[in-house]
Image (cartoon, coloured by chain):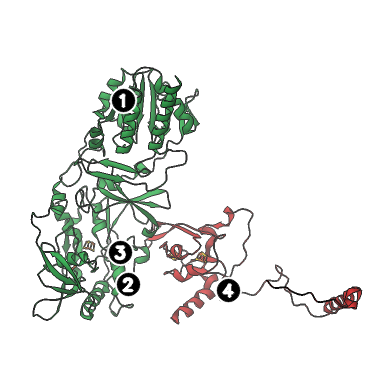
Amino acid sequence: MVVVKRRELTFWERIYLPEIFRGLAITFKKMFEPRVTRQYPEETLPTTEVTRGQPRLVVKDDGNIACVSCGLCEAACPAYAITIDGQETERFIEREPERFEINMLRCILCGFCEEACPKEAIFMSDELELADTTRQGLVYDMKRLERPASTLKPRIDYVRRINERW
Amino acid sequence: MSDLTKQTSGEPSTIERVEITVNGQTVQARTDKPLIQACVQAEVEVPHYCYHPGLTPEGSCRICQVEVQQGKMPARVMVACRTPVMPGMVVNTETENAHDARRECLEFLLKNHPLDCPICDKAGECTLQDYSFAEGQGEGRSVEPRRKLEKRKDLGDVILLDQERCILCTRCVRFMEEVPKSPQLCVAGRGSHSTIETWNDTPLSGNYQGNLADVCPVGALTLKSFRFKARVWNLTKTASSCGECSRGCATTVEVLRKGEVTRIRPRHDEDVNGWWICDTGRFALDAFSLADRLVGTLLPSASRGWDATSVEDGLQIASDMLTTGDKPLIIASPWLTQEEGGELLALGQKINAQVAFVSTASNDLADDVLHTGDPGPNRRGLSDLGLKAMTAEEILHTASEHSTVLCIGERVGRLLGEGEAEGFNGLPTGARVLLFDCELPEAPTEGNSPIDIAIGLPSSVERVGHWVNIDGLRRNILQARPAPAGVWNTLRLLKHLHELLTNREVQS
Ligand code: SF4
Ligand code: SF4
Ligand code: SF4
Ligand code: SF4
Ligand code: FES
C-alpha cells in the first residue's frame, strides 16, 4: 500500500479567489490566440492513399465486379465480418459473388481482406464515416460496397507499390 | 459383402511382412502393397497424385519419388507407389535427391497448370496446392504460354471437366475401369496434347460418377451440383453413415454455416464401402432441406388448417390417445436407429401394442458394387430387435383392426404412400392417427385431415445413434447440425412419452 501525502495548501490557495482569477486569466488570454481544434464534421481531415478506411469492392472499367468470390478475404478476416456466396457467370472468369456482405459493425478496419485478395478486388477506401439507426442497416451488401476502380485508384497504386517491395 | 469390398479388404490368408527402414524407423511392411503403404505405416507422408489406395498403382505422375537404398547398391530415387517392398530396404523421403526429384516433377506438373485456385472448387483440399506449398518453388521459370484447353467440358449430369487443370494422373480412367467396371474415360492425344475425354463426347453414365470428383487430386473433375456452392474450408464435416440403402456406407456430411447440408462424401471404411459411395447417397441432399419441416406439435384445427403447440403438450395429448381404445399399432420407419428402436419396443410393450416397421420396396438401383437396392438403412437392425417387417400395403390392411395408429420415424409418412399404398388416406376413418415425422404428408384433397396429431422429429443428420447394415455391421450416425428449434431428440421424446404413460398407470 502506498500512502500519498496531501500537500498542505498555502494561505492564498485556501482563500480560493486568487486562484480563480488566475485560471480565468488563462482563459481570456487564449480567446485571442489562433484556434488549433478542427471543426468536425464541417471540417474533415484530408485523406491520402495511406488512409485505411472502410473496405470497398472494385468495379472494373468494363462494369464487372473484380471479385471472384474466392473467399480468401472471408477466411482472413479476423472479425468474421465478411460473408460470401458464389455463383457461376458466363464471363471468362467463371465465378462471381452472388452475395457479398460486410458487417461494418464487426469490421475492425484491419485491412487483412485487402492483403488477402488475389484479384485486387477489395481495397481500403478513404471512406471513414459510419452511421445508421439499425444494426441491419450496417451490414453492407454488394450494392453498397461497390466502387468504380477510378475512385479507388490512388489506394490501388499505393498497395501495388507496397507489394512490390516484398 | 459386395464384390468391391472383397476386392479392397480381401486380405490374403497369409500376409507376408518384411522388415524395412523408413526415415530411420523400422517397420514391418506388407509385401503385397507398394512401398508407399509402408511409408504410411511409418506415418511418413509421401506426396502422391496418381496413386490411390483403392486403385491399381500406375506410376505416371512421379511425385512420390523417395530415395531407396538396398543391399550393396548405391541409393537411388524411385517412385514409392510402384516399387514393391523388399526385405532390408532403407527408404529416405527427406534426402536432397528426393526433394530435388519431387520439386522438379512439380515444376513440370505446374508448367501448364492455370492459376485458377481462387475460382477452383478444389482449392483447400487440393494436393497440388498442398505439395506446391510444401515443396514447390515460389515462381515459375517457364516463359512459354500455357496450354489452352477446354475449361467447362460437360461430362454429363454430374461432372464438369476442366482440361487445363488436369495433371493426367489417370486416376479417373482407372476408377471407371476398376470400380463400376464401366470404362468410359480415356486419355486422348499424346504428349502435351493429351487430354481426358469420353468416347465421342458421350456423357458419362452410371451411379458412381460422383466419386470422380473425389479421386481427381486436382480441380479438373468437379461436381456440377457443388459448383461454386461453398469454399471447402467453410464446411463443417461430421463422420456419419449414408441412409439411402441398407449398405450404410461411411460418409462425411458437410454442412455450410451450421445449416445447409452442402455435400456428402465417402469416408474410407474397409469393410463396407472402401473409398466410394454411389450417387444416390451422395446427392440425397433433398431429405435434409425439406421446404416444410414439421416443428413442434401440430393439431388439426376446425378450419382444416393446423394449430401449433409445444412438444410437451403434444406428448400429453399423444399419451391420452395411446391409452384410450384397444391395442394400438405402432409403425416405425426403417430410418430409426437401434437405440430408438429399443426404446420404441419398450413403449410398445407398455401399452400392449403391436410394433412393426415399414419394409421398403426394393428399387432398381441394386448393383454389384455397393447399392443393395433396399432403401431402408436399418432393416436388419430393427428385425433383429424383434420389430415385424411389413410392407406399406400390409400395414394399411392391418391398421383397419386397430383404433389407434402411431407412425414414427423419418420418412414414415412418405413410405406409407409408396407404390400401391394410399398413405394416410388409406387408414381406417375413425382411427386415431399419430404421426411423428420430419414433414407432413401431402394434404388430402377432400375431407378432414386423417392425422390427429403430428410431432416433429430430427432427420438423420440431426441425430446420434447407429443402424445395422445388411451384413450386420454397426453403422454410426452422428449429428452434423442442430435440429430446428422446437424439435426434440427422438430418444428424449420416446422416453418422455414412456414416462407419461407410466405416470398414467400409477394414477389409475
Ligand atoms: S478490414 Fe479487417 S475486419 Fe474489416 S472486413 Fe477486412 S479483414 Fe475483416
Ligand atoms: S479475396 Fe478478393 S476475390 Fe476473393 S472473395 Fe475476397 S474480394 Fe473477392
Ligand atoms: S486444381 Fe488445385 S492447384 Fe489447380 S487451380 Fe484448382 S486448387 Fe489450384
Ligand atoms: S481429370 Fe483428374 S483424375 Fe483424371 S487424369 Fe486429370 S487430374 Fe487425374
Ligand atoms: S503417385 Fe507415384 S508416380 Fe504418381
CA separation, marks 3 and 1?
Answer: 49 Å
Quarter of the image where one finds residue B397: top left
> Which numbered disc flags the more N-terminal residue, 2 or 1?
2
Q: Residue at x 71, y 68 (%)?
A: A42
Q: Which mark is residue B126?
A: 3
Q: Is residue B143 above or below residue B156?
A: below
Identified by mark 1, the residue type is Glu
Please give the chain letter of the residue carrying mark 2.
B
- Letter of the chain shown red in the rendering: A
Say which element carries label 1.
loop
Whether tag 4 and tag 1 are in contact, CB under 8 A, the answer is: no
Identified by mark 4, the residue type is Thr
CA separation, marks 2 and 1?
Answer: 59 Å
Residue B217 x %, y %: 25, 63
> Quadrant for ligand 5?
bottom left
Q: Nearer the viewer, residue A67 or A14?
A: A14
Ligand 3 is within 8 Å of the C-beta of the residue at disc 3 = yes
Residue A17 x %, y %: 91, 73
Residue B100 x %, y %: 23, 79
Q: Which mark is residue B422?
A: 1
Circle 4 is placed at which residue position? Answer: A51
Q: Is residue B277 above or below residue B105?
A: above
Residue B305 x %, y %: 48, 27
- Is residue B308 left or right of A18 when viewed as pictured? left
Specify the colour of chain B: green
